[in-house]
Image (tube, helix red, strand yellow):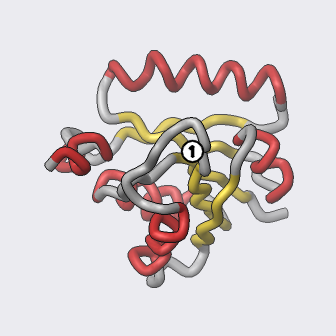
Amino acid sequence: MPTIAMYPGSFDPVTNGHLDIIKRSSRMFDKVIVAVLVNSAKTPLFTVEERVAMRESCKNIPNVEIDSFNGLTVTFAKQKGATVMVRGLRAVTDFENEIQLAHTNFAMMPEIETVFLATAIKWSYLSSTIVREA
């Protein structure tokens, strides 16, 4: 049975750090679904359609699919058949929030494991917030 992983996020905008995690996770799993969050509580810089258009950046990675969703990430992961949630870490400060999310997701759906990937050092300073501000 193929292993399907989901890499969720707002991707507003997608950064080289995100692409690093997408490329590396695509080598680890049979299929990677990049799940773009539609959050009505936030006002993104880019529309969901523009953020989903990042598929252009991933067109040379055949096992990557890009989709959008709203609601709970674990619910969408289950709908898509994902058994792994991929999360990127830039620094120790990211870990605190990410481990809380991983524990919450596990409590709701223990069949979905979370895997943390450290962003490559050359991209570790980047965040979507910094890119938007620049």
How many marks are shown on the rendered structure? 1
Q: Residue 92 falls in which quadrant of the image?
A: top left
Report the residue at 21% width, 42% height from top. Answer: 130
Q: Please state which of residues 30 and 67 is positioned toward the viewer in this rendering.
A: 67
- Which residue corresponds to mark 1? 86
Vertical placement of residue 122 versus 101, above or below:
below
Residue at 39% x, 75% y is 57
Q: Which of 84 and 125 is in front in this view?
A: 125
Q: Is mark 1 on a helix, strand or loop?
A: strand
Looking at the image, residue 60 sits to the left or right of residue 129; the answer is right
Residue 81 vs residue 92: left or right? right
Is residue 109 placed above or below 127 in the rendered structure? Answer: above
Q: Where is residue 47 in the image (x, y as percent from the top left)?
A: 48, 62
User: Can you give x and y, in whole percent of width and height, for residue 81 in the image?
Assistant: 83, 56
Position of 76 with respect to 97 (left or right) is right
Judge the density around disc 1: few (<14), some (14-19), many (≥20) Cα neighbours within 10 Å: many
Name which residue lies at 61% across and 56% down: 35
For residue 113, which quarter of the picture? top right
